[in-house]
Amino acid sequence: TDKMLKEYEGWTNKFIFPPYECGLADTMIANFYQSMSPLLMATAAFGGYDLVMEAYQKAVDNGYMFGCYGDAMLILND
C-alpha cells in the first residue's frame, strides 16, 4: 500500500485478474502469449483487457508470432 516492493519468502496463491491496479510499474514489455494463458491474463490486467485484446486481434490479423520466441508488445502508461 505504500507503493514499495517488500521482500517475501514462501508461496502465494495470488492470481491477478483484470482490472488490476499495478502499483509499482507503469510500463511493460510482454510477449504475445497464447490465448487463455495466465500470462495473457496478467498482461490484460496490466494493460487493460479491451486494449490488450484489440492489440492481440491486430497481431493475429497481421501474422505476428506468438509464444516465447514470438513478437512482443510495449505497454506504456500515457
Image (cartoon, rainbow, N blue to C red):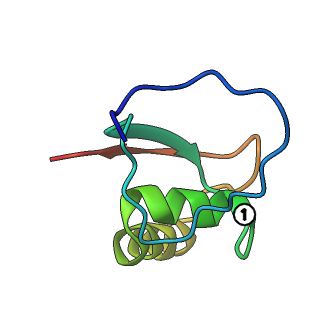
| Count of residue discs | 1
Residue 73 versus residue 28: which sits nearer the camera?
A: 28
Question: The residue under label 1 is which amino acid type?
Answer: Pro
Q: Is residue 76 above or below residue 67?
A: above
The residue positioned 31% from the left and 39% from the top of the image is 26
Residue 75: x and y in percent read: 36, 47
The residue positioned 72% from the left and 63% from the top of the image is 38
Q: In terms of image quadrants, where is residue 65?
A: bottom right
- Residue extending farthest front: 1
Relative to 16, 49 lies left or right:
left
Relative to 32, 37 lies left or right:
right
Residue 19 versus residue 49: which sits nearer the camera?
A: 19
Q: Residues within 10 Å of mark 1 (few under 14, many from 20)?
A: some
Q: Is residue 11 above or below residue 2?
A: below
Q: In terms of image quadrants, where is residue 69?
A: top right
- Residue extending farthest left: 78
The residue positioned 43% from the left and 67% from the top of the image is 52
Relative to 50, 8 lies left or right:
right
Q: Is residue 20 above or below residue 10?
A: below
Relative to 45, 15 lies left or right:
right
Secondary element at tag 1:
helix
- Residue extending farthest right: 11
Q: In terms of image quadrants, where is residue 23?
A: top left
| Residue underneath mark 1 | 38
Residue 42: x and y in percent read: 58, 58
Q: Could you tell me which quadrant the N terminus lies in?
A: top left
Residue 14: x and y in percent read: 69, 57
